[in-house]
Structure formats: C-alpha cells, structure tokens
Image: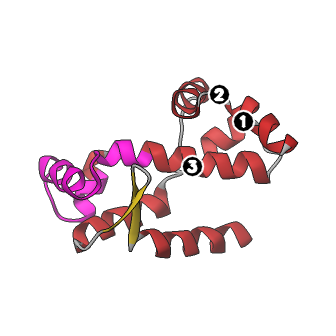
Amino acid sequence: MITQQYLFCIERLVTNIVPNHGQKKVVYDPRVKEILRYMHHHYGSKITLDDVANVAYLSRAETNRLFKKHLGRTPFQYLLSYRLDRSKELLVRTTSSITEISLEVGFLSTSYFIEKFKAAFGMTPNQFRQVEKKI
C-alpha cells in the first residue's frame, strides 16, 4: 500500500516535470503527459509501442517523433531508464532477489536486466546494493 501511494506521488510529479539528461523540463503536450502517466502506471508489465501510441491516439511513428521532440529520446529509451530507476529504489529499500526486482519493474529476463543496469550505472544490481548498504 505504501509503495503504491509512493508511486502515485511520483507519477503526479513526473507528469509535470520530466528528467531529461539531468535537467528538468516541463512537458506541456497533454499527449505526452498521457503517455507518461500510462508508462508510470504500467511499467511493471509488458508495454508495446502500439500500447503507448493508442493511449494518445497517435501512430507509432508520430508517438516516437513527439516523444523525441519533448523528451529527447524514444518512448522505450525513457521506459528503460524509468524501470532502471525504480529498480534502484527496490534494491535499496527491499531484500527482494535480483530476479524478483527485475520482474517487478518489467524486465522479462534477469540477464537482460543485469546487462542494462550495468551499462547504465557501471555496476551490477548486486554490486549496487552492496555499495548502498555501506553508505
């Protein structure tokens, strides 16, 4: 229940301010806000480009174009980043296994999750957890 409320609060914040390469950028386009709201609510499930495009009643190409215009990246680059950020929170706050966390944040493969986590943060999820415990 607490996690659900926390994610709801984060969703509210992110619908108005979206991180873009370390900077905060206000997104005014209501279609992008709807897509973000959908992604933040469903990030733990499989999300396709068709799903995202249907939320805003756009074509797949227009969805990509609009997202790149407002956020500087594709919907799936954003979704990957969002999932990885959520996984960092879970690694610090819970004792769940790496596999459980990877599934919870929407990765279908633990090895893919570990690969992407290491590429993004320079260490494996397990290494990240150990470093954070020492701090």
Instruction: Give me the residue at 62% from left, 39% from top.
Output: 102
Q: Is 74 part of what is drawn in magenta?
A: yes
**For the magenta stretch, what is the residue range?**
51-79
Please state the horizontal and vertical placement of residue 109, each as a whole percent of the image: 56, 29
Between the C-alphas of marks 1 and 3, the distance is 12 Å
Q: Which residue is mark 3?
A: 85
Residue denoted by label 1: 128
Q: Marks 1/2: CA distance?
A: 6 Å
Residue placed most toward the observer, 55 or 83: 83
Which secondary structure, mark 2? Answer: loop
- Label 1 close to label 2 by CB (< 8 Å): yes
Q: Label 2 amino acid? A: Met
Identify which amino acid the numbered label 3 is placed on. Asp
Q: Secondary structure at mark 1?
A: helix
Instruction: Report crowding for label 1: few under 14, some 14 to 19, many 20 or more residues within 10 A (C-alpha).
Output: some
Measured Cα–Cα span from mark 2 to mark 3: 14 Å
Q: Viewed as shown, does residue 88 lie left or right of 116? A: right
The amino acid type, in three-letter code, at marker 1 is: Phe
Regarding residue 1, the answer to whether it shows in the image is no
Q: Determine whether the residue tagged by mark 3 lies in a helix, strand or loop.
A: helix
Q: Earlier in the sequence, mark 2 or mark 3?
A: 3
110 or 30, which lies in front? 30
Residue at 40 percent of width and 69 percent of height? 17
Q: Residue at x 47, y 61 (%)?
A: 40
**What colouring method underlies this structural image?**
secondary structure
Note whether 118 is above or below 68 in the view shown.
above
* Nearer-N-terminus badge (1/2): 2
Q: Residue at x 78, y 54 (%)?
A: 93
| Label 2 sits on residue | 123
Q: Position of residue 108 (x, y in %)?
A: 54, 34
Q: Is residue 15 magenta?
A: no
